[in-house]
Image (tube, rainbow, N blue to C red):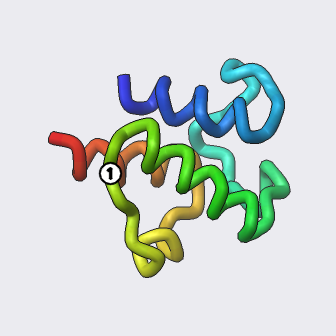
Amino acid sequence: MVLERVKNVVAKQLGVEASEVNITASFTDDLGIDSLEIFEIVMSLEEEFEIEIPNEDIEDIKSVEDIAKYIESKVK
């Protein structure tokens, strides 16, 4: 459930279909997302899940799967 919601948010930010978002895709290497776009995605995810993600945690998030696992650990 969390993964699907994360994929939907990422897809919306990128302007693609959720089915096109590979969960193991690296934000920078595979999706070509820069740091500003990552920040925008994180802001959207914070709003979607009603959580706050500290900047120092964002640095460790490299893929869609990483952010989904991070959020799952925070919304239990």
Viewport quadrant of the C terminus: top left
Q: Can you say whether 29 is above or below 3 in the image?
A: below
* Figure label count: 1
Q: Amino acid at mark 1?
A: Ile
Q: Is residue 36 left or right of residue 8?
A: right
Residue displayed at 69% across by 19% down: 19
The kind of secondary structure element at disc 1 is loop
Residue displayed at 38% across by 31% down: 2
Residue furthest to the left: 76
Residue displayed at 59% across by 44% down: 24
Q: Looking at the picture, how far across and down is residue 9, in whole percent?
A: 59, 34
Q: Report which quarter residue 12 is drawn in.
A: top right
Q: Can you say whether 3 is above or below 46 in the image?
A: above
Q: Residues within 10 Å of mark 1 (few under 14, many from 20)?
A: few
Residue displayed at 39% across by 72% down: 54
Q: Nearer the viewer, residue 49 or 76?
A: 49
Q: Looking at the picture, how far across and down is residue 53, in whole percent?
A: 39, 63
Q: Looking at the picture, how far across and down is residue 52, in whole percent?
A: 35, 59
Q: Nearer the viewer, residue 23 or 71?
A: 71
Read off the residue under disc 1: 51
Q: Is residue 73 left or right of residue 59?
A: left
Q: Looking at the picture, how far across and down is residue 42, in whole percent?
A: 54, 55
Q: Can you say whether 23 is above or below 36 in the image?
A: above
Q: Is residue 14 left or right of residue 58?
A: right
Q: Is residue 40 left or right of residue 68?
A: right
Viewport quadrant of the N terminus: top left
